Image (spheres, rainbow, N blue to C red):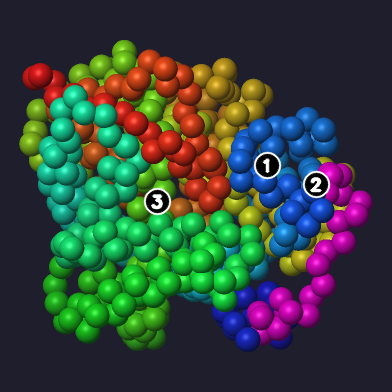
């Protein structure tokens, strides 16, 4: 059985055998420096990924290698590279071989790691949880939770917006995804999620070192897993619009339920994907609105024109400028700054020959700032997404915050619904502002794009 077949059948023993026996690709002919001994480019990679990409691109062009304690990786930059890797028409690249090193022991067996026919089958089943009728139920659950959480903001008080968002979105996710009020467990689950995410960025992945980010992440996985396992039997025979209940009742093509472990794996990863990526997106959106008061007023006029306490799905179509704003935040600060794959066969790109087993990565972050495709890319300008401009349509693969091809984010519509609903309830009631001395968005891109200072913002009730 070759590796393509093993991946298509999700044959883990065969895949592990391939990983153990296949030598690393010889990248000696690929341009790029080796960085520091052993650590390579790890420190600039973690400190300022955007700056590192720009520097290496200026030195080497759209193809260069980077080194970390895990080995070398080749970056392929620009829309053409994005299309080659994400579209993956010739089944040249594997997701599993790329993401396994990041997710093993933390988010095992998730949809992002699946390849080819195995991925297609699992994705088709999971799509039921993201159809319109399901999103309608999700909105009915999330809207009052977001509204109630926002109403708890103390007027005129500066808070760490990132922490506020994480807590609120965890509460929302518990009800939308799990269908329950996690109450006193919220703090422990939030800490567990943070530990799991931090573990994905640990280059060393040494579980035996109990205080390492990876070891803490594995323990965090156990905490959340125990919570999910407790509920599965009840959900198989209950009714509810939450994703957990839906997954417990979904069946594959042969009429079989997902196993307890499969349910755990899918729910755990979707909780991570929805919770942390939305926290990232709304953090950057709030910073942009606090920095652009006139545009904030534009959105406030848009949301107040709807004049409804509880939103319905069709109402969100009226929030046009709000959608542009979220899109622009995703352009400037994509939650996932790079997307890795591993080549299964030799291939050629931009005049370079890459051997089998070459780890490659494309970068939404880099492409979203290319002056060839974006006017003044460092300037916050939501109108670039207006019908009159449509800058994102210059090249189909120049704007990829949700990836592309067969692995394009399954929950992108859900994310838009949640983002618009949050901003609707917030801007109807609060003005968002920041300290005048806060002249830039302080953030890191790895493992996800998050503000490093907690994002101190002030929320003031409009009637105050």
Are the residues at dot 1 and dot 3 in contact (C-beta closer than 8 Å)?
Answer: no
Quarter of the image where one finds residue 53: top right
Q: Residue at x 46, y 67 (%)?
A: 216
Residue 453, how many percent across, how many down? Answer: 43, 36
Q: CA distance from mark 1 to mark 2?
A: 10 Å
In magenta, the rendered stretch is 14-34
Q: Where is mark 3, residue-wise?
A: 276
In the image, 120: left or right of 82? Answer: left
In this view, 247 is above or below 157 = below
Quadrant of image for the C terminus: top left
**Gap between marks 3 and 2 measured at Cα:** 31 Å
Neighbor class of circle 1 (other Cα within 10 Å; few <14, some 14-19, many 20+) is: some
Tags 3 and 2 touching, CB below 8 Å: no
In depth, the one of 353 and 70 nearer the eye is 70
First along the sequence among labels 1 and 2: 2
* Circle 1 SS class: helix
Q: Mark 1 — residue?
A: 44
The magenta stretch spans residue 120: no
Work out whether 93 lies above or below 252: above
Residue 308 placement (x, y as % from top left):
9, 33
């Amino acid at each position: 059985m070759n590796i393509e077949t093993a991946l298509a059948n999700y044959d883990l023993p065969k895949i592990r055998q391939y990983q153990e026996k296949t030598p690393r690709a010889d990248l000696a002919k690929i341009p790029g420096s080796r960085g520091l001994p052993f650590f390579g480019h790890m420190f600039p990679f973690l400190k300022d990924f955007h700056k590192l990409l720009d520097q290496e691109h200026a030195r080497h062009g759209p193809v260069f290698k980077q080194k970390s304690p895990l080995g070398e990786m080749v970056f392929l930059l620009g829309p053409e590279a994005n299309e080659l890797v994400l579209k993956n028409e010739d089944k040249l690249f594997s997701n599993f071989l790329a993401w396994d090193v990041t997710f093993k022991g933390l988010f095992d067996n998730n949809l992002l790691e699946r390849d080819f026919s195995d991925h297609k089958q699992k994705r088709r089943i999971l799509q039921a949880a993201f159809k319109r009728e399901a999103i309608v139920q999700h909105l009915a659950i999330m809207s009052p939770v977001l509204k109630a959480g926002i109403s708890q903001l103390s007027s005129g008080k500066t808070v760490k917006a990132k922490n506020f968002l994480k807590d609120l979105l965890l509460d929302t996710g518990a009800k939308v995804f799990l269908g329950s009020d996690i109450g006193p467990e919220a703090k422990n689950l939030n800490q567990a999620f943070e530990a799991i995410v931090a573990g994905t960025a640990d280059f060393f992945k040494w579980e035996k070192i109990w205080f390492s980010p990876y070891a803490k992440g594995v323990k965090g996985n156990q905490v959340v897993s125990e919570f999910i396992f407790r509920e599965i039997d009840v959900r198989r025979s209950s009714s509810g619009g939450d994703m957990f209940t839906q997954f417990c009742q979904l069946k594959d093509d042969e009429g079989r339920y997902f196993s307890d472990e499969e349910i755990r794996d899918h729910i755990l990863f979707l909780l991570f994907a929805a919770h942390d990526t939305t926290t990232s997106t709304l953090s950057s959106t709030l910073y942009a609105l606090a920095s652009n008061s006139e545009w904030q007023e534009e959105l406030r006029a848009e949301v107040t024109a709807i004049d409804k306490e509880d939103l319905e799905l069709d109402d969100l179509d009226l929030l046009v400028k709000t959608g542009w704003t979220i899109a622009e935040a995703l352009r400037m600060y994509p939650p996932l700054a790079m997307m890795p794959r591993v080549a299964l066969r030799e291939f050629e790109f931009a005049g370079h020959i890459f051997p089998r087993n070459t780890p490659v990565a494309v970068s939404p972050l880099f492409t979203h700032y290319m002056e060839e495709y974006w006017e003044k890319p460092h300037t916050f300008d939501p109108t670039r997404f207006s019908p009159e401009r449509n800058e994102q349509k210059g090249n189909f693969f120049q704007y990829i915050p949700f990836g592309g091809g067969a692995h394009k984010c399954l929950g992108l519509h859900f994310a838009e619904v949640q983002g618009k609903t949050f901003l609707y309830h917030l801007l109807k009631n609060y003005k968002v502002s920041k300290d005048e001395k806060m002249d830039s968005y302080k953030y890191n891109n790895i493992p996800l794009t998050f503000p490093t200072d907690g994002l101190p913002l002030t929320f003031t009730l409009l009637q105050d």
